[in-house]
Amino acid sequence: MEIVVSGIRSTGNLHLGNYFGALRNFTRMQHKNKCFFFIADYHSLTTHPIPADLHGNVRHVLAEYLACGIDPGAATIYLQSDVPEVTELYLLLNMISYTGELERTTTFKDKVRNQPDNVNAGLLTYPVLMAADILIHKADKVPVGKDQQPHLEITRKLARRFNNMYKSECFPEPEAYNFGEKLVKIPGLDGSGKMGKSEGNAIYLADDEKTVRKKVMRAVTDSGPTGPGQEMTEPIRNLFTIMHFVSGPDTIQHFKDRYNDCTIRYGDLKKQLADDLVIFMKPIQGRINDILANEDYLARVASEGAERARESASATVREVRELIGFKPF
């Protein structure tokens, strides 16, 4: 049984890209692997050092995880900040990380451009904290998107470096986990790229019906096909991609036919997509609200998850300390 570790930052609600890209697959793998799913509240401070409501964000993301099917009886789900061993390993890994290699990461360069007034040390060492999150449980597999693969390579490098420096086989070199299939990429509503928080092009699981309809109706389109069988532009292809996940095959075929014979009306397409999204999201939102109303359940899930995560993490840190040479008198 392989060990799988994955986390999501607590800076906002989960969106459809999270759901179709990872969460749906987490529910499948949690009964076949030893899974650790965590809410990365420390990571969120690299871009939001003064969060408006950190606890509220964490609470909501935890409820969304559970509403989407993560089973705390099958997998370990916990808060990053509830496992202090993570920060100890983070510190120790920083001692074998080099500023040059961290400064060269594409994600760091992107963040520097995006937030030039907040280039903090945590931003630079973000990949090291991510490595600590992964290596603390000696993970074999890590579900990551393409944008996070450079961080995973740093994790692998640090695992090798630690093992070589301390002549051990303490850490495995984790590999990207793609669920045995091509990774799903949910496009945004802005006509390009993937759906994401920072891009501002996402539909969130917690969005109410009015918000969903408003976002979809504002989605980028084009001027329409000018001839039969014309290839779709990226914005239109994106709308059909989203429709593929929430609409029936007859509905999709209807609008493809209308596109191919040049009679499509994008307003009708968007209205149908909005209708199907609202229907799809309604049961998930109902579960989110039920879980949020049950404070005792949320507290129990977080507490029990932290206990199991710390059991795994403390064993790793104990081994690391011994290898480095920290010993009691």
Image (tube, grey):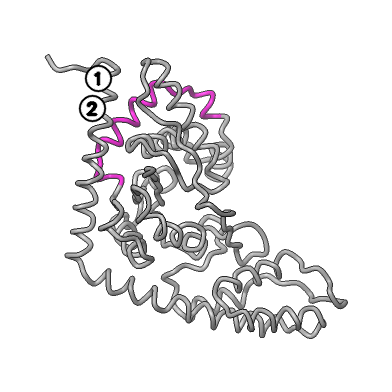
The image quadrant where one finds the C terminus is: top left
The x, y position of residue 234, in whole percent, is: 72, 64
Does the residue at mark 1 contact the one at mark 2 (Cβ under 8 Å)?
yes
Above/below status of 255 relative to 152:
below
Q: At x 58% / y 58%, what residue is drawn?
A: 185
Q: Amino acid at mark 2?
A: Arg
Q: Nearer the viewer, residue 125 or 63?
A: 63
How packed mark 2 is, by other alpha carbons closer than 10 Å (few <14, some 14-19, many 20 or more), is few
Q: At x 41% / y 59%, what residue is drawn?
A: 28
Q: Badge 2 is on which residue?
A: 318
The x, y position of residue 299, in whole percent, is: 19, 59
Q: At x 69% / y 84%, what residue is drawn?
A: 254
The image quadrant where one finds the N terminus is: top left
| Magenta part of the chain | 80-103
The x, y position of residue 257, in whole percent, is: 75, 82
Q: Badge 1 is on which residue?
A: 322
